[in-house]
Amino acid sequence: MGRTSTARDRLRDSACELLHTRGYAAVGVAEICARADVRKGSFYHFFESKQALTIEVIDTHWQAQRAAWRERLGGPEPAAGRLQRLIMWLVETQREAQQATGRIDGCLLGNLAIELSNQETAVQQRLTAAFDEQAELVHANLTEGAQDGSVAAEYADLATARAVVAQIEGAVLLAKLAGDTRSLDNLWPHVRRLVTVPSRR
Amino acid sequence: MGRTSTARDRLRDSACELLHTRGYAAVGVAEICARADVRKGSFYHFFESKQALTIEVIDTHWQAQRAAWRERLGGPEPAAGRLQRLIMWLVETQREAQQATGRIDGCLLGNLAIELSNQETAVQQRLTAAFDEQAELVHANLTEGAQDGSVAAEYADLATARAVVAQIEGAVLLAKLAGDTRSLDNLWPHVRRLVTVPSRR
């Protein structure tokens, strides 16, 4: 691999890893360059600032995530089953990352949202757009579920979709804090309660 | 107010405000000292490190929060009503803070959990203890609710209590990101779905 041709990608990939693991304020341009094996003088040839690189990291990450969300939420099955598939995949992603790294870094977008919402307007706008899209994808799923009967019609609203996203973020936060993904086994049963009305026993 | 006698308290209060607003890595000892009007040389007379001060901030914050949680969860009403009172109070806290500061800083403990879980073991342990206590307080409430009939008996478990805490944290994260507390109006209806079985219409 030529060094020059991939320097930009290496900077973005290194930043993604470091931002995910340690956060925005804790990671400097020098460390990103060192990890990427790019001279610090070259950094500003590719990116105006750490903020600009962070926005590209968010866009690249959410672009891949969006495709994965759409894939899990698509298909001929009842909508609640497709939502379950998304949740199980998200949980599996955290598990695999822990097996690979020994850590639970949690959700890159959620981490940056917590750290930067009040401090970096351009980043905050990008994250807001990503979380809005997540809620819209879930909302579309719930609407389909209300039609196929797998979701309670009275819960097929955008507020419930946001509550599903909130439950995911909160559960991942607690798993990250505990350093243990076992609690995520319950994520789907809990999300299911938000979107369905159980039969009375 | 004598300067020497309250320097320690001022350092703790300044750190609490700065950590809540901007996070751990973004805030240095020099800035905490400047905000507290304490000479930097005196800092290490009171605290071994920024980490040690952060632990004291967490302990002080959670001690006050714990008392408030217990107060809202206590009383003669059905348990679900007391849980609702806790949730409404938490939402009101975010609203009042936004009115006072123009920002939503979110949950101090959640913010630090996201930022430091993988990086500062002593802080992570303190935060784990606080979130464990939150889940235990909610679990005790749910257990009472299963007895008085206001909570579904099959949902009165520790996993559900953790899901309630996760719902709070996730909803506050999204409100912080949006810079808008209106979405928190739905927090209680969503938590209620986690802990009750609605009557079939």
Image: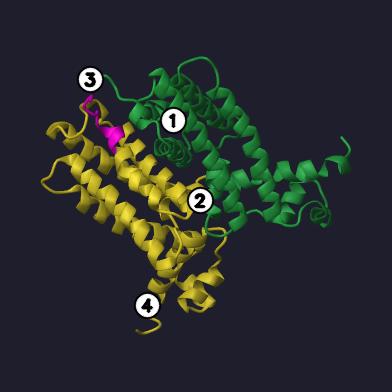
Chain colours: A green, B yellow
Could you tell me which residue is drawn at 60 percent across and 33 percent down? Answer: A66
- Image-based side of A46 in relation to B171, left or right: right
Q: Is residue B57 above or below residue B151?
A: below
Q: Label 1 crowding class (10 Å Cα cut-off): few <14, some 14-19, many 20+?
A: many
Q: Mark 2: which amino acid?
A: Ile
Comparing marks 3 and 4, which lies closer to the viewer? Answer: 3
Residue picked out by circle 1? A184
Tell me the magenta residue range. B192-201
Task: State which quadrant residue B193 falls in.
Answer: top left
Residue picked out by circle 3? A200
Task: State which quadrant residue B100 falls in.
Answer: bottom left
Measure the C-alpha gap from mark 3 to mark 4. 59 Å
**Where residue B47 sits: x, y (%)?**
46, 67
**Where residue A78 sits: x, y (%)?**
45, 17
Could you tell me which residue is drawn at 26 percent across and 51 percent down? Answer: B69
Disc sitting over residue B6 in the figure:
4
Task: Please tell me which residue lies in front, B155 or B198.
Answer: B198
Note whether residue A104 is visible.
no
Disc sitting over residue A114 in the figure:
2
**Where residue A200 sits: x, y (%)?**
23, 20
Label 2 in the same subunit as label 4:
no
Instruction: Determine whether the residue tagged by mark 4 lies in a helix, strand or loop.
Output: loop
Measure the C-alpha gap from mark 3 to mark 2. 39 Å
Instruction: Determine whether the residue tagged by mark 1 lies in a helix, strand or loop.
Output: helix
Task: Please tell me which residue lies in front, A7 or B48.
Answer: A7
Instruction: Determine whether the residue tagged by mark 3 lies in a helix, strand or loop.
Output: loop
Comparing marks 3 and 1, which lies closer to the viewer? Answer: 3
Task: State which quadrant residue B67 falls in.
Answer: bottom left
Label 3 in the same subunit as label 2:
yes
Dots 2 and 4: beta carbons under 8 Å? Answer: no
Q: Mark 4: which amino acid?
A: Thr
Q: Mark 3: which amino acid?
A: Arg
